[in-house]
Image: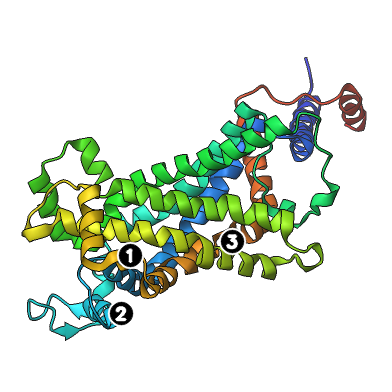
Amino acid sequence: MSSPANDKLAEDSAVVLANSADMYAADNDANAELPPAVESSFLMTYRATGLGVYGAVLRFAGMPLEKIALYLNSAQVSGNNQLQQAIRLTFADSSVGGAGSKWSFAAPFRVVGPASIVAWFLQYSVMGFVFQVCDSALSNALGVPRMPYGPQLMEDPKNDAPPSSSAGEPSSKSYVKAALAPAMAGAIESVVANRAEVQRYFGIQRFAQMEKSLGWNAFGRVLAPAFVANASRNFIMSSTSFVMTPVLYRQFFPQEKKSQTSLFWFGLGMNVFVGNTVAITQQALWGRALDYAAAGGGARSISYGAVVREGLKKEGVSAFYTVPKWASRVLMNAPVQGTLPWFYNEVLPIAEGSVLGAFKQAYFAITREKQPSAALPSSNIEKIQCES
C-alpha cells in the first residue's frame, strides 16, 4: 500500500506532466500552420469585415453628398442651377410645412434606417468577400494568378517569373477572369444593397407604398426597382477598385515612386477620372428609372428603353452625363470607393498578421479540446519523473 507521501508525489508529477503537455502543445501551435482552406477563409472574412465597417462609417458621414448626387441624377432637377436645386431638395425638412419649406442639416440623415446601415456594411463587405471568392475560384478554375494584393503591389514587375511558351492562352483566360469576377461581385452586391438604396431615394414610407402597389413576389422585392442599372454601376466600380487600380499600379507605376501615399492618390484618381466617368451614366439611368417607376404618384414596372428615349428626347446626352452630374457622383462615391484600394491593400494588411495569429491560437485551442491530450516526448517524461 502506498504511503501518503508517495500519493502526493504522484499527484504532483501528474500535474507537472499535464502542464508540460499543455505548454508543449502551445509551442507546437505557435509554429504550426493552419489548413490552407481555413486560413484563406479567415483572411477573406477579415478583409471583408474591415471593408464593411469602413464603408458604412464613411457612407453615413457622407449622406448629404449622396442625396445631392441622387437628386442631380434624377428628373427632379432640370434647366439651370441644377446643383442649387439639388442642395435645396437635400436639406429641405419635409417634416415641417408638408412641402419641405424649412431647411435642416439633419434632413438627409433622416432617411437612413437600420436597413441602410446593415446594407452599407453588407454592400462593402459582400463586395470585398464575393470578389475575393470569385477571384480565387476563377483563378483556380482557369489556372491563372489571383489579383495582386497588399505588398504585391509594391513589387517590381520586372522580377516576375518569365511567361511560359503558351503565354497567349493564360493571358486570354486572365482577361476573362478580370471581367467575370467584378461582374459577379457587382451583381451580388446589388442584391444586397439596391433595395436599401431605393428606400433612401424615395424615403421609407413612400417606398413601402410603392412595394405594395407593385405587388412583386419575394424575389422581386429583394432585387427592388432599377436593379439592372444598379448592378451595371457596381460592376464598373468593382472593376475599377479591385482589377484596374491594383493591376495598373503594380505593372506601370514608376517603381521608385511606389508608396502608400502614391497608391492612395492613384486609386482616388482612377475612381474620379475613370470609374465615375463611366459609372455616372448608369447612376443617371438608375435615378431616371426610379422616377419612371414612380411617375404620377403611383408605381409601375420599368422599361429601360422608354427611360433612355424619354431622357434623350428631353435633354439629349445631358440627361445621362453632365459635369455637375459627374462632380456630384464623385463627391458621393470618391471618399469611400476612391480610397478603397488604399484601405484594402495598405491599411488592412497592417493588422492582418496579428489577427491571424490570434485566430490561429483560438483555432488550435478549440481543436486540441476536441482531441486527446497532447503527448510529451518520452525524453521529457523521463526528465520530469527523475526530477520528481
Tell me the number on the disc at residue 317. Answer: 1
Foreground mark, 3 or 1, reads 1
Label 1's element?
helix
Foreground mark, 1 or 2, reads 1
Crowding at label 3, few (<14), some or many (≥20) Cα neighbours within 10 Å?
Answer: many
Q: Which residue in the structure is indicated by mark 3? A: 343
Q: Is residue 129 left or right of residue 349?
A: left
User: Do the CB atoms of the residues marked 1 and 2 lie less than 8 Å apart?
Assistant: no
- Identify the residue at horizontal 13%, vertical 59% (top origin): 206
Mark 3 or mark 1: which comes first in sequence?
1
In the depicted view, which residue is nearer to us: 285 or 114?
285
Between the C-alphas of marks 1 and 2, the distance is 18 Å
- Identify the residue at horizontal 9%, vertical 77% (top origin): 99
The N terminus: image quadrant: top right
Label 3's element?
helix
- Disc 1 residue type (three-letter): Val
- Disc 3 residue type (three-letter): Phe
Foreground mark, 3 or 2, reads 2
Location of residue 74 (image quadrant): bottom left
Between the C-alphas of marks 3 and 1, the distance is 35 Å
Observer able to see residue 359: yes
Between the C-alphas of marks 3 and 2, the distance is 30 Å
Q: Which residue in the structure is indicated by mark 2? A: 83
Q: Is residue 213 left or right of residue 254?
A: left
Crowding at label 2, few (<14), some or many (≥20) Cα neighbours within 10 Å?
Answer: some
The C terminus: image quadrant: top right
Q: In this view, does 190 lie to the left or right of 340?
A: left
In the depicted view, which residue is nearer to us: 181 or 12?
181
In the depicted view, which residue is nearer to us: 328 or 18?
328
Q: Is residue 227 left or right of residue 165?
A: left
